[in-house]
Amino acid sequence: MTLAIATITNSIAALNVALVHIRDIDEIPETVNASDCPIIYPKPDGFVTNFRVEVNSFGSSSAKKTVRYTLTYRFLQAALSSGRGLFDVYDDLVTNVFAFLDAVIANDALTGAIDDTPVNTINFGAVGDPAGNLFHGADIAIEIMEFVN
C-alpha cells in the first residue's frame, strides 16, 4: 500500500492561480511578509484530518482499499497591520480563494488522487501565519480520496 499525499500536495502546489503563491508541504513559511501575499500553504496545525480507510475486497495485504482524508490549507490575503481593514481586502480575499477553489475543482487529475472535493469548510477572518502574525485570510479544506492495495 502506498499513499500518495506528497504527490497530491505537489500537484496542488503546481496549480496556476494568477497572483497567488501556492506552497507545498516542504515550502511552509516560518513567517509571512506582506510582500508574500496572497499566499496559500498547508496549515501546519491540522493539515491532515478525518483520515479513514475502507476495505473494498478480501485479502490481507492485497486487499483493495479506499482511503479518504481532509487536507486543510491556510490562505493569507493581507496583513492585519497593513492599515487596510477587512472590507478593503474582502473582495480580493474572496476572489482569490475562489480562484484557488476553481483551480482545484477544474483539475480532474491531481496526480495520486482519485477524487478531490472542496468541503464546506471555508472560514474567512483573521488567521495567523506559523509565527503568529495575523492576516486577513481563510482556511480551506479539501477532501481527498485515494484507491490503494
Image (spheres, rainbow, N blue to C red):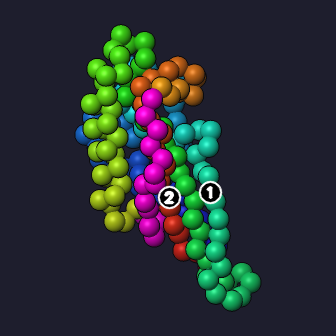
Residue under label 2: 143
* Residue at disc 1, secondary structure: strand
Where is residue 141 shown, x and y percent of the image?
A: 49, 49
Find the magenta span and give its range.
Answer: 111-125
Q: Which image quadrant for residue 107?
A: bottom left
User: Hey, what amino acid is under mark 2?
Assistant: Glu
127 vs 12: above or below: above
Q: Are marks 2 and 1 in contact (CB under 8 Å)?
A: yes
Q: Residue 50's mark?
A: 1
Taking the spot 43% from the left edge, 17% from the top edge, the residue there is 80
Mark 1 burial class by Cα count in 10 Å: few <14, some 14-19, many 20+: few
141 vs 117: above or below: above
Mark-to-mark CA distance, 2 and 1: 9 Å
Residue 123 among those drawn in magenta: yes
Q: Earlier in the sequence, mark 2 or mark 1?
A: 1
Magenta region, mostly helix, strand or loop?
strand
In the image, is 107 to the left or to the right of 126? left
Taking the spot 36% from the left edge, 10% from the top edge, the residue there is 83
Where is residue 89 shown, x and y percent of the image?
A: 31, 24
In the image shown, does 97 or 6 lie closer to the viewer?
97
User: Hey, what amino acid is under mark 1?
Assistant: Asn
